Amino acid sequence: MELGLSLGEAMADAGRELVLGLGMGVGVRREEGAAETGRRDHEVRRELEFGSNRCGSSPEPTVRLTLLPMVPGLGLPWPPPSESRHLEASTRGFDVNRPPSSGGGCAAEEQDDAAGAAVSSSPNNSAGSFPMDDFSGQGHGGTDAAPGTGGGGGGGDRSCSRASDEDDGGSARKKLRLSKEQSAFLEESFKEHSTLNPKQKLALAKQLNLRPRQVEVWFQNRRARTKLKQTEVDCEYLKRCCETLTEENRRLQKELAELRALKTVQPFYMHLPATTLSMCPSCERVASNSAPAPASAAATSSTAAPPTAPSGGIASAVAATAAPDHRPSSFAALFSSPRGFPLSAGPQAQPPTSS
DNA sequence: CCTAGGGCGGATGTTACTTCA
DNA sequence: TTTGAAGTAACATCCGCCCTA
C-alpha cells in the first residue's frame, strides 16, 4: 500500500512529491519540475517561520526579524519598478570589500555592480568589512544590540572591526559576518522575495553596502537552509502520519477479525434489520440508511465505520452502525485538509488520532 | 584558562535549466 | 530548428568563527 501525499501548493513549489509508504518509513522523491521557471516569484509565501511553535527542535528564532533597525532610508529595496533604474544610479556607499579608494575609482565601482560581481567574488575579495556607518551607531563598538551572544562581543560587528585591517591579498578566504542589521534586513527582504531579480539584488546590495554577489549568496544559502529545515519538518510529520495510519490499519484489521468471528458464531446477526452503510465520496464519512442490504452490512461497517466498542456485542455494533460516528476516519482526517499538508501549522497540527 | 567538538553561516564550485541571439 | 553563451537556482561542500562542555 502506498499513499501518494499531495503536499499542497507549497510542496509543489518545492518541486517534490513525497511518497509515504505505510510502515516503511518515508521516502522522498524529488521531481525537479520543468515548469519551475515563472513560479519562483510566487514561492515567497512558503517561507516558514521556524519558531519554537513550529518545531521544537528548530532553534531558529523568529523574533530575529524584530531586530530590524530603524534605519532611515532603509526601505525594502524594491520600490515601484520605475525607481529601480534610478536606484542603480543612486548613491552608493563605498565598496566594503575593497579598500576605500580615492575618488578615481568611481567608474570601476559602478562596473562592479553590474558585471563586476564576478570579479570581486574571488576568495580574496570576500574579506568583507562592513563599516555600516549607515546603521544607527552600531558600527564598531561592543554596543551590540543583540543581548544573546555576550561572548560574541557584537555578532556582526565582528566583521566590521575585522576585515578592513586584515590582509586583502591573503589567499585564505576570509569569513565575514554580516551585521545583525544586515541580516535582519536580508531576512525581511527574504520574507518578501525568496528570490531576487537582478534589480532587487543590486538595490539590496547598495542599501546594505554589500556586493551583489554577497546578497545573492546569502539568498541562496537562506533558501537552502530553509528548505533543509522544511524537509526535516516534513519528514517528522510524515513519520507521524505513518505511525497513525499503521495504528489505524492495525485497529481495523483487528476489528474486522472480530466481526468475522462474530458473524460465524452468531449467524442470527445477519437476520437483523440491515443497515446499509455507504461512504460519502465527498466527505469520506460513513452514512447509513435503512435500505435492505443484507450480508454486506457487516463487512462494510467493519472497514468504513468501526464501532466504538467492537467487543460490545451485537447491540452495540448495530447501534454503532445505525448512528455512525461522523468523526472522519484518521485517514480522511489526515488528508481532508485543503492543503493536504499543514505546512504553515507544523507538526503541532497533528492529525487527530484514531483513539 | 585551555581545548576539542559541534553548529552556524558565508563562500565556492558544479550542475542543470532557461532565455536569447 | 539548432546551437552556444549568459544568467541563475539548486545543491554539495568547504571552512572560518563562535559557543559550550
Image: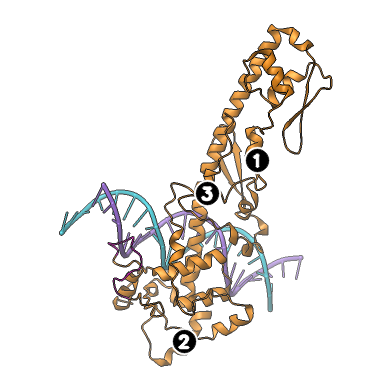
Chain colours: A orange, B cyan, C purple
What is the span of residues highlighted in magenta in the rendered image? A140-152
**Which residue is disc 2 drawn over?**
A108
Question: For the residues marked 2 and 1, what is the alpha-carbon distance in whole angstroms?
Answer: 57 Å
Q: Amino acid at mark 3?
A: Thr
Numbered tag placed on residue A335 in the rendering: 1
In-image side of A212 versus A22 (left or right): left
Q: Position of residue A269 (x, y in %)?
A: 74, 11
Mark 3 = which residue? A231
Vertical order, A54 against A91 (above or below):
above
| SS for dot 1 | helix
Q: Is residue A144 magenta?
A: yes
Q: Residue at x 65, y 59 (%)?
A: A36
Q: Where does the image place residue A109, in percent across and percent down from the top left?
A: 46, 85
Which label lies toward us, 1 or 3? 1
Q: Is tag 3's residue or tag 2's residue first in the polypeptide sequence?
A: 2
Which chain is disc 1 placed on? A
Q: Which mark is residue A300?
A: none
User: In x, y percent, where is residue A141?
Assistant: 29, 74
The answer to whether residue A314 is above or below residue A197 is: above
- Residue depicted at 37% across the width and 85% down the height: A100
Q: Earlier in the sequence, mark 2 or mark 1?
A: 2
Q: Is residue A325 visible?
A: yes
Could you tell whether A142 is left or right of A75 in the image? left
Query: Dot 2 surroundings within 10 Å: few (below 14), some, or many (20 or more)?
Result: few
Quarter of the picture containing the C terminus of chain A is top right
From the viewer's side, name the closer residue of A165 and A178: A178
Residue found 84% across the figure and 19% down from its top: A292
Q: Amino acid at mark 1?
A: Phe
